[in-house]
């Protein structure tokens, strides 16, 4: 059985373990990005913030598939940010080469949806909760919806601490978790 308010389903026979043209190892697949955007309640009239923007898959999907005009992202990896700048074409795109902690939630446009794929898994270290927790808590005061893909242990703790919904998933065979603001 599935919870209709938080069900995600996607099948992809190829993975990103051997990237092709334009792909990066660890990049989120578009169908998962779209599922996260749906959970956060993204529509054309809502800005989208991705504080772990990577190569921009979520922001590109927000613009191309949901008609989002304002895409905001933060990324510490310069190469990934370069790819995001090439592919995210929303008219009001602002991509910052800096940590998620440089984001000021109180300055976000009204109605912003926070959607992100946090680093996790075999290739990337999870963001320490002592840094992530306070940031997400501040964000909750200023965003209208949130959907985050993260490692399962971290997701369980974040969901409990911030009173958010949580669904366990598998991503490329790795246990993961989607944490979201219930609609």
Image: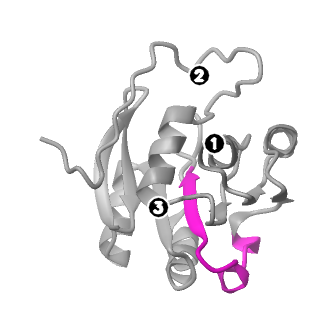
The magenta span reads 101-118
Among all residues in the image, which is located at the extreme left?
Answer: 1
73 or 88: nearer the viewer: 88
Report the residue marked by disc 3: 41
Residue 135 against residue 51 in the figure, above or below: below
Report the residue marked by disc 1: 61
Report helix, strand or loop for mark 1.
helix
**Residue 122 visible in rendering:** no
Q: Position of residue 82 (x, y in %)?
A: 87, 41
CB of mark 3 within 8 Å of CB of mark 1? no
**Residue 23 visible in rendering:** yes
Report helix, strand or loop for mark 3.
loop
Report helix, strand or loop for mark 2.
loop
> How much space separates mark 2 and mark 1, taking CA atoms?
17 Å
Residue 165 against residue 125 in the figure, above or below: below
Instruction: Say whether disc 3 or disc 1 marks the residue closer to the N-terminus.
Output: 3
83 or 60: nearer the viewer: 60
Residue 107 part of the magenta-drawn span: yes
Q: Position of residue 165 (x, y in %)?
A: 30, 64
Density class for disc 2 (Cα within 10 Å; few <14, some 14-19, many ≥20) is: some
Q: Which mark is residue 16?
A: 2
Density class for disc 3 (Cα within 10 Å; few <14, some 14-19, many ≥20) is: many
167 or 161: nearer the viewer: 167
């Amino acid at each position: 059985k599935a919870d209709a308010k938080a069900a995600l389903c996607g099948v992809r026979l190829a993975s990103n373990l051997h990237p092709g043209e334009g792909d990066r190892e660890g990049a989120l697949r578009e169908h998962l990005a779209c599922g996260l955007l749906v959970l956060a309640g993204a529509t054309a009239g809502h800005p989208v913030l991705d504080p772990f923007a990577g190569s921009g898959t979520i922001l590109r999907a927000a613009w191309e598939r949901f008609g989002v005009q304002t895409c905001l992202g933060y990324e510490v990896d310069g190469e990934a940010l370069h790819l995001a700048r090439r592919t995210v074409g929303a008219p009001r795109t602002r991509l910052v080469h800096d940590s998620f902690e440089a984001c000021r939630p109180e300055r976000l446009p009204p109605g912003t949806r926070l959607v992100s794929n946090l680093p996790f898994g075999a290739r990337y270290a999870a963001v320490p909760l002592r840094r992530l927790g306070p940031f997400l808590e501040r964000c909750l005061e200023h965003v209208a919806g949130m959907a985050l893909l993260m490692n399962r242990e971290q997701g369980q703790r974040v969901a409990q601490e911030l009173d958010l919904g949580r669904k366990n998933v598998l991503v490329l065979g790795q246990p993961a978790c989607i944490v979201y603001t219930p609609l």
